[in-house]
Image (cartoon, rainbow, N blue to C red):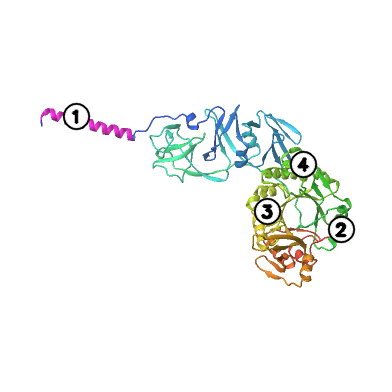
Amino acid sequence: MTRQMKLISASVIVIVIALIAALLAYKYAPSKEVMELGEYFSVSGDEMAVLMQDGYSEERGYYIEGVPYLSLSMVKDNFNKGFYWDKSSSMLLYTKPDGVVKAAAESMEYIFNKNSTALDYVPVRIIGEQPYVAVPFVKEYSNIEYTAYENPNRIVITYDWGVNRLVTHVRKETVLRYEDTNKSPIIANLNKGDKLTCIGMDEEISGGYTKVITVDGVIGYVANKRIEESNYEVVDREYSEPQWTHIKKDYDICMAWHQVTNNQANEGLLTLLNNSKGVNTVSPTWFKISDNDGSISSLASERYVQRAHKAGVEVWGLCDDFSKEIDMSVILSNMTSREKLQSKLVSLAIEYDLDGINIDFENIPKEAGEDFVQFVREMSVRCRNNGIVLSINNYVPVEYRMYYDYEEQGRVADYVVIMAYDEHYSGSPEAGSVSSIGFVKDAVSGIIEKVAPEQVIMALPFYTRLWTVKNEGTEAQTIETAAYSMPGADSLLSDRKLEPVWDDVTGQYYAQYNEGDATNKIWLEDERSLEEKLKVVTGGGIRNVSFWRLGFEKSEVWNIVTNYINARETL
């Protein structure tokens, strides 16, 4: 090989080595590229990024005049569902055990029990036609901590307490990167001793890196060799929840509804009570919402209450929403009509010396669910301040009725009543039991998951239904039904000399008979079916019961009732 060729070969080798070295240097040398936090958070103007506990919210807040704001929906969904937006008055409401906080949009004050308090910020703003709540105002009534930062705008909120989180500290000055590679841009500089919260344990992360959150809310990746060994710490905060006290009886409640449709019906009270045993509370159906302004019609009787009290029986006046002339969405969503309804009910209770009010709103559409719950909150304050027991009637808990918010009812009202009947009802597409044993079991298990058993009153039927099915099983099938009292159902079977058969599935006696092209079916309520239900109710820890309705029962059932419900004996 000539000398020239050797020199060329050597040069090529040197170049190759240099290229390899350069490639290795590029491969392993960390990137010095910096991603500005403004680009990282991608917020502009008054927008604010929101870090909640260990992750960013897709929804943005706003940072206005040094105050962070979050949408009311975000506040309710994550921190405190007690806030309520009253569209009719453009006011944010928050109900406390002793009153209602009211903050008008864009005002720098709020009102509590008619007293105004000035603030150095606006507690609620309208942004894009939606209410946004100042975070310091939220914190005033919620168990949260937060820190807000500028340049760029962001907020770090802690709200999930009593949990363990994995933390570490920076061992030596280093950087936080956007991704888990040293070629990723730098998003923050980390100093020795900086505290980091470790997250993303269920993610696949490249070896040598840990996903962390900085104290000021930046999420990224740090090299393991630059941090200390991690350890768990409990995230906790001292906070006292407002105490919603309840008016509770020191005996088991044995209530019966008394259907009163005219003034003359009030005179039948003593006869009905004398035919009963163990009843210590009666709920007459006296009050009806009569218009969309919140007015009430009343059949209340002072003489009735005096007689009941003399017999040792409390009176809880019932108010229903059965009028076809009213729209509960309109009434409950309007603060004026809602407060008028509450005020009238309480004034009637005081005027007639009632012991309690029984709310029986059965026509609440889903879209009015929040309005109904706010009505219950506000009503509970008025009743509590006047020593009036507040009970709320409800359907059996099922998924599509969760907007009634049984848990919140139990928090603010004295008693939550579950009507464990109308499993099959007038207009039902099929014939069936009014209250099968399985239906009652579901009622008990469903409500005690949400409300303490001592606050639950389980309502059971003294009635049944006769179902007349024509052309059964065909496209021409029709179903008609009529309600029967216990004695009425017995007479029906006796007249036809029918012997009912016990049905283990429903926990009731069953009978049927044919008339022409119609099949008549009936699932009976009697002493045995009632006892089966009471076993389930008391077995679930519920000691309070009610019955629809007084006068529909057989006298024999009262011995069964008093065997299971240790109610105070009537005088």
Which residue matches tag 4? 292
The mark that comes first in sequence, 1 or 3, is 1
Task: Give the residue at x 20% y 31%.
Answer: 12
The tally of labels here is 4
User: Rounded to the nearest whole Å, what is the CA distance between mark 1 and mark 3?
Assistant: 87 Å
Q: Is residue 566 visible?
A: no
Closest to the observer: 312 or 534? 534
Q: Which amino acid does label 2 sit on?
A: Gly
Label 1 or label 3, whichever lies nearer to me, is 1
Label 2 or label 1, whichever lies nearer to me, is 2
Which residue matches tag 1? 11
The mark that comes first in sequence, 2 or 1, is 1
Specify few, some or many for label 2: CA neighbours under 10 Å numbering under 14, 14-19, or 20 or more: few
Residue 353 locus on image (x, y percent): 85, 49
Splitting the image into 4 quarters, where does residue 26 fall? top left
Label 1 or label 4, whichever lies nearer to me, is 4
180 part of magenta stretch: no
Which residue matches tag 3? 452
Q: Which amino acid does label 4 sit on?
A: Asn
Does residue 65 sit above or below 475 in this rendering?
above
Dot 4 lies on which element? Answer: loop
User: Rounded to the nearest whole Å, what is the CA distance between mark 2 and mark 1?
Assistant: 118 Å
Marks 1 and 3 in Cβ contact (< 8 Å): no
Q: What stretch is highlighted in magenta?
A: 2-27
Splitting the image into 4 quarters, where does residue 557 fall? bottom right
